Amino acid sequence: METPRLVLASASPARSRLLEAAGINALIWPSDFDESLVQSSDPIDLVQTLALRKAETVAARFSAEPVGAPLIVIGCDSVLAFGGEAYGKPDSAQAALARWKQMRGQSGDLCTGHACIDLGRGKTLVRCGVTRVYFANVSDRQLEAYVATGEPLKCAGAFALEGQGSLLIDKIEGCYTNVIGLSMPLLREMLNELGYDPLSLSLG
């Protein structure tokens, strides 16, 4: 079985750290895709489409050159489905605080779209991971302190489960790494479906 080269079409440090922790030496190539070009009221459709567009944007940059070893481009996108809305990163501290005041004591679904494009075999897979997140019923003071750290402004849903935001989460139901932005179990399943051994991945 050939060992593919993996390209992550994302600038997210959290996603690259997940791959590194799994021993996967991926090439990081941010797509810079304009997310405003995709609109959908369905959070799963939204993240799957965005993940695919990001992966396609990066794949197009490699397709004009000889690939050599198998090359797989991975695109991801996350939103929090809460109260009938899909929330990405808040655009201000005020928006983050207002969102948290709505979410505390409630639950929402963190949806992460995953797209894998196998350039060598001409195959594309698109999937979505969904994890239920239960938010703690914390005080205004605690929310203000958290927003003041700046962390919520960098994350879909206005929280980082791997950061200080973990103090404000009661529990989750589903995949932990999906909340961080890349479901490692789902990635394993997709790579298996493409015919590769996930444990053999390297930059090559």
Image (tube, grey):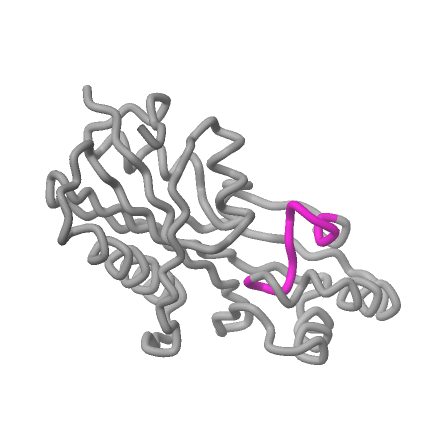
Task: Answer with the quarter of the image where residue 31 lies.
Answer: bottom left
Magenta range: 156-166
Q: Quick one: 17 or 105, which is closer to the camera?
A: 17
Tell me residue 120's x, y (percent): 13, 39
Tell me residue 109's x, y (percent): 51, 57
Above or below 141: residue 75: above
Q: State which quarter of the image contains the N terminus.
A: top left
**Is residue 194 left or right of 173 when viewed as pictured?**
left
**Is residue 163 left or right of 38 when viewed as pictured?**
right
- Residue 74 sits inside the magenta stretch: no
Q: State which quarter of the image contains the C terminus.
A: top left
Q: Residue shown at 61%/59% (left/top)?
A: 107
Residue at the extreme top of the image, as rendered: 1
Tell me residue 20's x, y (percent): 50, 33
Q: Residue shown at 36%/38% (left/top)?
A: 187
Residue at the extreme right of the image, as rendered: 141
- Residue 164 sits inside the magenta stretch: yes
Q: Residue shown at 37%/73% (left/top)?
A: 34
Q: Residue shown at 71%/48% (left/top)?
A: 166
